Image (cartoon, rainbow, N blue to C red):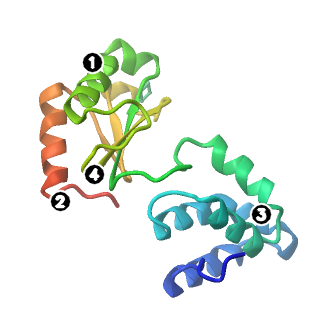
C-alpha cells in the first residue's frame, strides 16, 4: 500500500467505529459504508490504490473490494466532477421524459454519459430506479433527490451548482 494513502484522522475514527459494529472475523460487513467514506475522502472516486487501502484495513483481498465497488453505480471508478448528476433512466422515469432530461444535460454541458464537463464541475451518470418513481423524472445529486424534473428545472439546478448553492450532503 502506498504510504500517501490514508484517511483523514476524523474519517479514520469513523472507520474504526463502523468496524467495531461487527465481530472481528466479519469486518468485511463494514465494506460499503467504508467505501462511501473513502469516496468522500479521496476526491469523489475510488482509485485502485484507495480500494487496496480499504482491503488492507478490513483484512480482505483487494478483489473483494473491487467486486463490490464496481457492482454499485454509486461508486465512481474514475475521477468525477464536483456535481455528479445521476439521472434515473428506469421505466417510470423513462415514460415521464428522463431521456429528454438526459439529452438536455448532454447538450447543455456538452458531455456524454459518464463524462465530465470541461469546467470539471459536472459528471453525468445514468442510474437505475432510485425509488422515487412517483416523482419521475428524477435525479440524485449528492445525498439529495431532485424530482419532477423539467428542462427548466434542470437549468436552475445547474446554475445553483455553479453558484455553489446546492447542498450535496
Ligand atoms: S423509475 Fe426512476 S425513481 Fe424509480
Residue 106, quarter of the rendered image: top left
Distance in Å between CA atoms under marks 4 and 3: 33 Å
**SS for dot 3:** helix
Q: Which residue is mark 3?
A: 28
Query: Mark 4 or mark 2: which comes first in sequence?
Result: 4
Across and down, in percent, residue 80 comes to 41, 51
Q: Residue furthest bottom?
A: 9
Across and down, in percent, residue 113 comes to 41, 31
Residue at x-position 37% and y-position 30%: 112
Q: Residue furthest front?
A: 118
**SS for dot 2:** loop
Q: Which residue is mark 1?
A: 100
Is residue 148 visible in this depiction of the protein?
no
Q: Residues within 10 Å of mark 4 (few under 14, many from 20)?
A: some
Q: Which residue is mark 4?
A: 121
Query: Mark 2 or mark 1: which comes first in sequence?
Result: 1
In the rendered structure, find residue 164 and report the number of the disc placed on it: 2
Residue at x-position 52% and y-position 50%: 78
Q: Residues within 10 Å of mark 3 (few under 14, many from 20)?
A: many
**Is residue 1 positioned above or below 82 on the image?**
below
Q: Quadrant of the C terminus?
A: bottom left
Q: Nearer the viewer, mark 1 or mark 4?
A: 4
- Relative side of 152 to 141, left or right: left
Labelled pair 4, 3 in contact (Cβ < 8 Å) = no
Amino acid at each position: 500500500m502506498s504510504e500517501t494513502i490514508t484517511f483523514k484522522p476524523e474519517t479514520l475514527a469513523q472507520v474504526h467505529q463502523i468496524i467495531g459494529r461487527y465481530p472481528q472475523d466479519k469486518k468485511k460487513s463494514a465494506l460499503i459504508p467504508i467505501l462511501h467514506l473513502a469516496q468522500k475522502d479521496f476526491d469523489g472516486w475510488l482509485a485502485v490504490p484507495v480500494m487496496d487501502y480499504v482491503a488492507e484495513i478490513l483484512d480482505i483481498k483487494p478483489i473483494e473490494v473491487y467486486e463490490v465497488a464496481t457492482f454499485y453505480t454509486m461508486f465512481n471508478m474514475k475521477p468525477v466532477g464536483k456535481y455528479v448528476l445521476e439521472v434515473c433512466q428506469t421505466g417510470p422515469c423513462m415514460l415521464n421524459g428522463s431521456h429528454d432530461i438526459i439529452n438536455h444535460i448532454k447538450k447543455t454541458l456538452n458531455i456524454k454519459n459518464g463524462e465530465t464537463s470541461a469546467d470539471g464541475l459536472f459528471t453525468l451518470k445514468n442510474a437505475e430506479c432510485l425509488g422515487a418513481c412517483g416523482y419521475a423524472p428524477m435525479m440524485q445529486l449528492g445525498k439529495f433527490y431532485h424530482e419532477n424534473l423539467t428542462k427548466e428545472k434542470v437549468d436552475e439546478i445547474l446554475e445553483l451548482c455553479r453558484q455553489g448553492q446546492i447542498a450535496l450532503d
